Image (cartoon, rainbow, N blue to C red):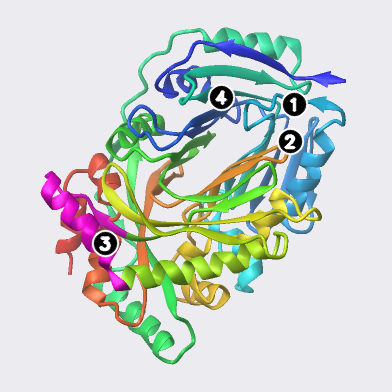
Amino acid sequence: MHVQDVVPLPYLADPCGYFARIRHRRGAVLLDSARPYSHEGRFDLLSSDPVAQVESRRGITREWHAGRERAASGSPFKVLATLLDELAPQGWQLPGEWPFSGGAIGWFGYGLGARLSRTPWRDPGALPDLRVGIHGWALMQDHELRRSAAIFTPLVGQALRQEILRELGQSTTAPEPFRTTSPFRSNMDRAGYACAFARIREYILSGDVYQVNFAQRLSAGGRGDPWEAYLRLRRRMASPFSAFMADGESALLSLSPERFLRVSGGRVETRPIKGTVRRGQDPETDRARADALLASAKDRAENVMIVDLMRNDIGRACRTGSVHVGKLCSLESYANVHHLVSVVTGELSPDETPLSLLEHCFPGGSITGAPKIRAMQVIDELEPDARSVYCGSAGYISFDGNMDTSITIRSLAWDGDEIHAWGGGGIVADSACDTEYRESLTKVEPLLEELQPGAIAALLRDP
């Protein structure tokens, strides 16, 4: 029997202290609860040196394993599932006290949903639509029990294990500061947004769709280390489903507050967010804004619409009759915003897997609209550029069947030359164009303002 080795390590209140020591390694990834700045998340997960990798770029999926590279046909989700099965030896003794026991870690870009929506594939730019590594080891932190451990599977040789443990104990140097080198610019001006908004309203009034989540992309030139930018951003807008993943010149910087899909012991959970308001600067204003959000008929209606969509999506992979709404339009508060969050649960069917569930539900309904397929077609028609990693997902799928993934909102993509952010919102029948335009910018204000003070004010001044 293969026994995994769990090596206790000193607990760190901030997981970035550990990740900074290994981030130079090939395929380094961090799934970050943003402690100590956020207190909603419990676990951190970081790793490097994947034994295999799957990447989908320009409509072609490729996998690397054992020094070999090959193109793979079929759904990228199924390609990944096959590789995950091949690399998980039978008879492993898994340490059940940790939610991850080796497996897949990475991101799934929004563009993977093109097959679902029957829309043409669009080039996502410098970052691939999917980049997922199969990892034979991980460092995990449990902030509830204040403990840390490195978990090594039989896929990791003794020499690599000792090298990783040695580096985890070393000191680090400060990263090079990250700076923008040009003003942030949108891929559509105010007039262009208004034209797209009018078209969406036509679709809604004709009964073609009920809601469309429409986004604009904001880009600026940059120079320096994106890790330094991530460290600043997580202090400013700490979120429990954050992630940093870099490979070569590209990187994902995600400060997401939204869980997409979690599977633990066969139990499925999704937590769609619909309804957002900025926090007030004093307790009285903050409470008033939270109360107004809870009382907003528009926001509650949008949330209920997406809950129905997610019930249907997870129901395709769950036992009949097991899908329930545990919470509906519950208030959750984060560093910069209040959200309305619902919780939908179910029990995974015996003939389904976490990856098949992810494929059935991808991309998340909270960032498409309803009905989902038609809303995605409208998005494809009216958004000038592909969404890339934005509104996709990041997370892990463990060899033992556990999975936890986020929706990559409040996220940035670094392509080596430019930093890209996206801001959007759900447009419904009673939406007002100017309000939605401003909201699409103010939602990403903390991201842009940290990197370039005055960026949002400059964008709002542009005609």
CA neighbours of label 3 inside 10 A, class few (<14), some (14 to 19), many (20+)? many
Over which residues does the magenta segment extend? 276-297
Which residue is outermost to the bottom? 206
N-terminal of the two: label 1 or label 4? 1
Which of pointers 3 and 2 indicates the residue nearer the eye? 3
Q: Which residue is mark 4?
A: 140
Say what amino acid the circle numbered 2 marks. Phe
Q: CA distance from mark 3 to mark 4?
A: 36 Å
N-terminal of the two: label 3 or label 2? 3
N-terminal of the two: label 2 or label 1? 1
Residue 287 in the image: above or below residue 69: below
**Residue contact between numbered discs 2 and 1, judged by CB atoms under 8 Å:** yes
Q: Which residue is mark 3?
A: 293
CA neighbours of label 4 inside 10 A, class few (<14), some (14 to 19), many (20+)? many
Q: Which residue is mark 1?
A: 94
At mark 4, the secondary structure is strand
Q: CA distance from mark 2 to mark 4?
A: 15 Å
Q: Which of the 4 quarters of the picture holds residue 73? A: bottom right
Say what amino acid the circle numbered 4 marks. Met
At mark 3, the secondary structure is helix
x and y, in percent, of residue 444 in the image: 30, 52
Q: CA distance from mark 1 to mark 4?
A: 14 Å
**Residue contact between numbered discs 1 and 4, judged by CB atoms under 8 Å:** no
Q: Which residue is mark 2?
A: 399
| Residue at figure coordinates x 37%, y 33% from the top left | 39
* Camera-side residue of 7 and 324: 324
N-terminal of the two: label 3 or label 1? 1
Say what amino acid the circle numbered 1 marks. Leu
x and y, in percent, of residue 72 in the image: 79, 51
Say what amino acid the circle numbered 3 marks. Leu
Q: Which of the 4 quarters of the picture holds residue 46? A: top right
